[in-house]
Every structure is written in C-alpha cells, then in structure tokens.
Amino acid sequence: MEKKKVYAIIEALGLIVLGVLIAAFGGQSVIDTYFGIILVAGGAFVICICLYDLIKTKFMLFSPLFLGTAALLVGIFILIGKYSFAYFLYTLILLIIAGGIALLFYGIYTISKRATLYGVVQIVVGTVVATLGFLYIFAPKFQTAFWIVAGIVLALYGVFYLVETLFDKKRVTKKSR
C-alpha cells in the first residue's frame, strides 16, 4: 500500500473518532482531555512525517512542521491543565469557518475538473462547516448543539474520506466496468 494512502486512511479514521468524541462529549469538560490527546498525537504524527520526509528526500516543508509543533504544544498545555480547550475555542471557530469556506471553493474547483460526486460532498460539507462556525459565534444558544452537529459532520466526512480512499477510482480496471 502506498504511503500516501496509509496516511489518508489514518486521517480518515482520526476524523471518524474525533467526530464521535465531539458529538458524544462536546458539552462536557471531558473534551479537554480528548482534544489534548488528539492534538499531541496529531502534532507528533505530523512532526514524524516531516522528519521522515527530511531524511528520505533531504527536503522538508516548514508549514506542516510548524503546525505539528503548535498542535503538540497546545495539546500538552491542555493536558497539564495550564489552559482549557475553551481558551483556544474562538481561534478554532475562526479556523473552522476558514476551513469550511476553503472546502466550499475546493468543491467548486473539483466539480470543474469533472469529479462531481466528490465535489458535491466537498461543497455540502464546506457549507455546513462554515455555517456551523458562524452560528457558534452569532447564536450563543446554538453552542451546545454545535458540538453534536460538528461531531456528526466530522464523522460522516471521515467515513466518506475513508471509503473514497479505500475504493480509489484508479483501482477500477476496464474489465470490471
């Protein structure tokens, strides 16, 4: 199996687990522990990938290394109780809005390249994610439901991403059509 495909499977499974945890525990203080663990694990994973690429290709991108280090440090601060996840929440909400808008535009781009199903899913998920972010900021009564809906959307997107990765179009031969 290709390295890229293994990473995609791990990412999809991480999205599913994260989505289920957010939907189940989003309104409780237990979420600090889960996000801390996920940030530490994800940050360490990204740093390891960057270092592996450096050793293998003698080239390393610094933006993933920076993001991995930031995620690792924020996760450690959350786990040791120095900060609560709520401290980083509005930054996260702004990133969620930006990610949703980026996903929306990527879906439009994907449709223009004739990958309609994948593009439509990107557009729907991007629109839902950006809308959730705006509702969290502008409708305070929605904040409890936000975590449930956000978790479900993340888990469903993770399932779609996993299925799309496992059943890649390139593996379908002309004989099987």
Image (cartoon, grey):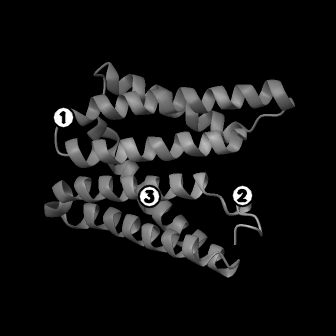
The answer to which image quadrant residue 1 occupies is: top right
Label 3 and label 1: CA atoms lie apart by 25 Å
| Identity of the residue drawn at 57% across and 38% down | 67
Q: Is residue 47 left or right of residue 148?
A: right
> Which residue, given by chain and number where applicable, does mark 3 sit on?
157
Q: Farthest residue toward the left?
A: 141
> Which residue, given by chain and number where applicable, does mark 1 sit on?
29
Q: Vertically, is 113 above or below 8?
A: below
Residue 168, x across and y down, in percent? 65, 58
Give the residue type that dot 3 points to.
Tyr
Give the residue type that dot 1 points to.
Ser
Q: Nearer the viewer, residue 142 or 169?
A: 169
Going from the N terminus, do you reach mark 3 or mark 2 first?
Answer: 3
Quadrant into which the C terminus falls: bottom right
> Which residue, given by chain and number where applicable, does mark 2 sit on?
171
**Number of the front mark, 3 or 1:** 3
Q: Is residue 38 left or right of residue 112?
A: left
Q: Farthest residue toward the right?
A: 58
The reply to whether callout 2 and callout 1 are in contact (CB within 8 Å) is no
